[in-house]
Image: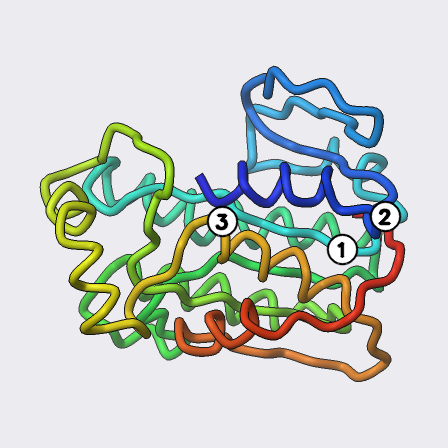
Amino acid sequence: MVGGYALRYALDNPAVESVTSIGRKKLGILHSKLKEVLHQNFADCSVLADVLSGRDAVVYCLGTYTGSVSDAELRAITADYTIEFGRVLRGSSPNAAFSFLSGSGADQTGKSRLAFARYKGEAEKALLAAGFPQVYLFRPAYIYPVEPRKEPNFSYRLLRAVYPVFRVLFPNQVIRADDLARAMVDIVMRPTQERQGLVLENRDIRATVESQPPLQNHTA
């Protein structure tokens, strides 16, 4: 969901020169700036070394919902795939900026009782240790889908139903999917020479959306 918005925003953004999309399924999108790469096994990203060479920035949105897969699959998708992708990217584009879709409550200490929080924290910790010059860890709370979709479980159906009220009462606990995607793209476009490892909680993401800095041309 978020990755789709990020892709469309990057393609429409004149500051982005080119976009390489890596995923399991065809996008069904034709665009002069888009190169599409199909890759099935994210447990081994070695074959992507050439594809990832010369990248200025990466927006990583691969993930799954808690309860939709087994615990072993959740850990593999959430932590192992991220760490493997980061390993190959670091070897091919050591100066790339990395924007990572994590989640609220991510715990880098590994002490959380929630598996999702532990696995997201594990991925965050590995990305920070990988040596990228800029790593941006996005920790959204409830992500509002914007466009109608089949919700993964009852909790998400309930949250979507009460979103108008929830947004007013708890604005820092919600973020629109398209706003989140825009923030993830824009932040890696910022010109900076400073090494950064920033954690952006939901409140920070909203602030980023509300104040966007000037952009420069990059290859994403």
Q: Quadrant of residue 19?
A: top right
The residue at the point 80 percent across, 84 percent down is 194
Instruction: State the residue in front, 134 or 218.
Output: 218
Foreground label between 3 and 2: 3
State the residue position of label 3. Answer: 178
Q: Please report whichever mark, 1 or 3, sits nearer to the chain's N-terminal start.
A: 1
State the residue position of label 2. Answer: 219
Could you tell me if the residues under marks 2 and 1 are in contact, i.e. CB atoms within 8 Å? yes
- The secondary element bearing badge 3 is classed as helix
Residue 42 in the image, given as x and y percentages of width and height: 56, 35
Residue type marked 2: Thr
Q: Please report whichever mark, 3 or 2, sits nearer to the chain's N-terminal start.
A: 3
Residue type marked 3: Asp
Instruction: State the residue in front, 155 or 117.
Output: 155
The residue at the point 65 percent across, 54 percent down is 86
Residue type marked 1: Ala
State the residue position of label 1. Answer: 57
Q: CA distance from mark 2 to mark 1?
A: 7 Å
Instruction: State the residue in front, 181 or 21.
Output: 181
Residue 126 in the image, given as x and y percentages of width and height: 56, 66
Q: Residues within 10 Å of mark 2 (few under 14, many from 20)?
A: some
